[in-house]
């Protein structure tokens, strides 16, 4: 039988302070497992190879690019993590996430070599997602990678999907249904102060935004605009067409502004498109320090989440959970039959707009802008969804699956 204090190796490319939603939820899980008496080790990447302690968690970083570009770069990161993993001592359990793609295969190799349990936490689904994010590979290569991933999943003790749509896709594409559990992700609870009263629609809005200054230095005034906030990465799976069209439709409404927070090539392209279309109602901010994140997220009257139709079942946008944590309504531009679409319908915490439909998006924004009751009802729905998505429930569910995986493996 396993020891009284089981040990676990958690593997993912990102881990705080590096940015990334998968790193945040991984750290939440690692901290809770350490508090529960597990011996926790995290294998991740960094600017150089070194080891450190994060409270009771041992963190081993291998040198790798902070922002790998393309399949070759990601393959190199995968290889480095594989070599580092095989040098780790035996643990009772290994948990793999999905950054870099096909990380599940490393978990399988480690599990087989060390004769331990393996749990795969599927934050997004590769190689299925490659076409949606613009990675072009021959079909025979995609099929081979998919077979490899599914074989590794079917050798693991459990595969955790973060959405019902993802669980269905896994089952329909070869993963044994008995191995699949659906455990949703959770909001970043650091964005919410439980000691505060129920969030109210702010009376004062951050005003003069630019790429140069952080939020805390921005001027404020007493004539706030209605802010539409998009915070985070703009990838190929997050189309901007409808948002740009909506900004054009709403340009005669000076009381409405669109604010994008982030950096990178996609934000550079957004800046170019803003200039080409002459959209004065679009503002840009760089990534903000974590100390300012709560104020920033609550500064949005509406949050935007965008996802391509062909990414349905392959990912669940983390931006949605950030909006819930800030108790703000969300307008979701994407396929309705997804985890985000289901939660918006169940909780009434926003609206769903078809991909590419800028006019409908503009109408939805005006609806919440002009009807305070509709906004407050959606805000209350977001607050309730956040309460029902508390991290304790999901984390304890993952830990229960982890314990079952160890017991099954030993048996």
Image (spheres, rainbow, N blue to C red):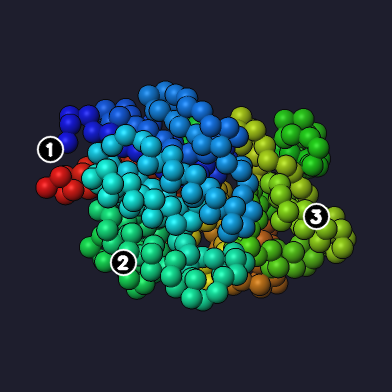
- Distance from the alpha carbon under mark 1 to that under mark 2: 28 Å
Seen at 66% across and 61% down, the residue is: 365
Relative to 221, does residue 232 appear above or below in the rendering? below
Quarter assignment of residue 345: bottom left
Q: CA distance from mark 2 to mark 3?
A: 42 Å
| Residue matched to label 1 | 1
Going from N to C along the chain, the mark reached first, 1 or 2, is 1
| Between discs 2 and 3, the one toward the N terminus | 2
128 vs 388, left or right, is right
Check the image and report above or below for 368 versus 223: below
Q: Secondary structure at mark 1?
A: loop
Question: Dot 3 surroundings within 10 Å: few (below 14), some, or many (20 or more)?
Answer: some
In the figure, is residue 216 to the left or right of 272? left
Q: Position of residue 84 (x, y in %)?
A: 43, 39
Instruction: Name the front one of labels 1 and 2.
Output: 1
Report helix, strand or loop for mark 2: loop
**Mark 2, other Cα within 10 Å: few <14 / some 14–19 / many ≥20:** many
Label drawn at residue 271: 3
Residue nearest the viewer, comparing 264 with 299: 264
Q: Residue at x 34, y 32 (%)?
A: 40
Within-10-Å neighbours for mark 1: few <14, some 14–19, many 20+: few
Residue marked by disc 2: 175
Q: Earlier in the sequence, mark 3 or mark 1?
A: 1
Q: Is residue 305 visible?
A: no
The answer to whether the residues at label 2 and label 3 have Cβ atoms under 8 Å apart is: no
In the image, 315 versus 126, the foreground residue is 126
Which residue is found at the position 55% from the left and 74% from the top? 138
Please provide percent x and percent y for residue 386.
44, 46
Q: Which mark is residue 260?
A: none
Disc 2 versus disc 3: nearer the observer: 2
Q: Pointer 3 and pointer 1: residues touching (CB < 8 Å)?
A: no
């Amino acid at each position: 039988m396993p020891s009284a204090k089981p040990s676990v190796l958690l593997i993912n490319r990102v881990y705080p302070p590096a940015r990334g939603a998968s790193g945040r939820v991984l750290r939440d899980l690692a901290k809770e497992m350490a508090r529960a008496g597990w011996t926790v080790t995290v294998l991740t990447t960094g600017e150089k190879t070194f080891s450190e302690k994060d409270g009771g968690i041992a963190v081993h970083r291998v040198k790798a690019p902070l922002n790998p570009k393309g399949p070759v770069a990601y393959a190199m990161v995968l290889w480095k993590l594989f070599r580092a993993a095989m040098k780790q001592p035996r643990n009772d359990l290994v948990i793999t996430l999905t950054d870099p793609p096909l990380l599940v295969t490393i978990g399988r190799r480690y599990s087989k070599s060390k004769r331990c349990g393996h749990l795969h936490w599927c934050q997004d689904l590769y190689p299925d997602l490659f076409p949606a994010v613009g990675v072009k590979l021959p079909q025979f290569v995609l099929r081979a990678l998919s077979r490899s991933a599914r074989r590794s999943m079917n050798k693991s003790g459990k595969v955790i999907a973060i959405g019902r749509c993802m669980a269905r896709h896994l089952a329909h594409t070869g993963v044994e249904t008995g191995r699949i559990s659906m455990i949703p992700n959770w909001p970043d609870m650091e964005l919410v102060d439980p000691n505060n009263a129920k969030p109210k629609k702010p009376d004062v809005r951050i005003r003069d935004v630019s790429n140069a200054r952080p939020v805390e230095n921005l001027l404020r005034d007493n004539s706030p605009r209605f802010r539409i906030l998009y915070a985070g990465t703009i990838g190929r799976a997050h189309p901007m067409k409808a948002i740009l069209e909506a900004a054009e439709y709403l340009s005669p409404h000076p009381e409405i502004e669109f604010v994008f927070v982030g950096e990178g090539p996609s934000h550079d392209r957004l800046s170019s498109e803003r200039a080409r279309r002459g959209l004065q109602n679009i503002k840009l901010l760089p990534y903000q320090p974590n100390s300012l994140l709560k104020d920033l997220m609550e500064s949005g009257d509406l949050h935007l989440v965008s996802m391509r139709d062909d990414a349905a079942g392959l990912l669940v946008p983390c931006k949605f959970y950030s909006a819930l944590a800030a108790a703000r309504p969300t307008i979701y531009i994407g396929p309705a039959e997804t985890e985000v679409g289901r939660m918006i319908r169940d909780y009434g915490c926003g609206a769903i707009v078809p991909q590419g439909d800028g006019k409908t998006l503009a109408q939805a924004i005006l609806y919440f802008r002009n009807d305070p009751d509709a906004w407050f009802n959606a805000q209350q729905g977001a607050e309730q969804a956040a309460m029902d998505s508390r991290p304790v429930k999901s984390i304890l569910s993952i830990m229960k699956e982890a314990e079952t995986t160890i017991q099954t493996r030993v048996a």
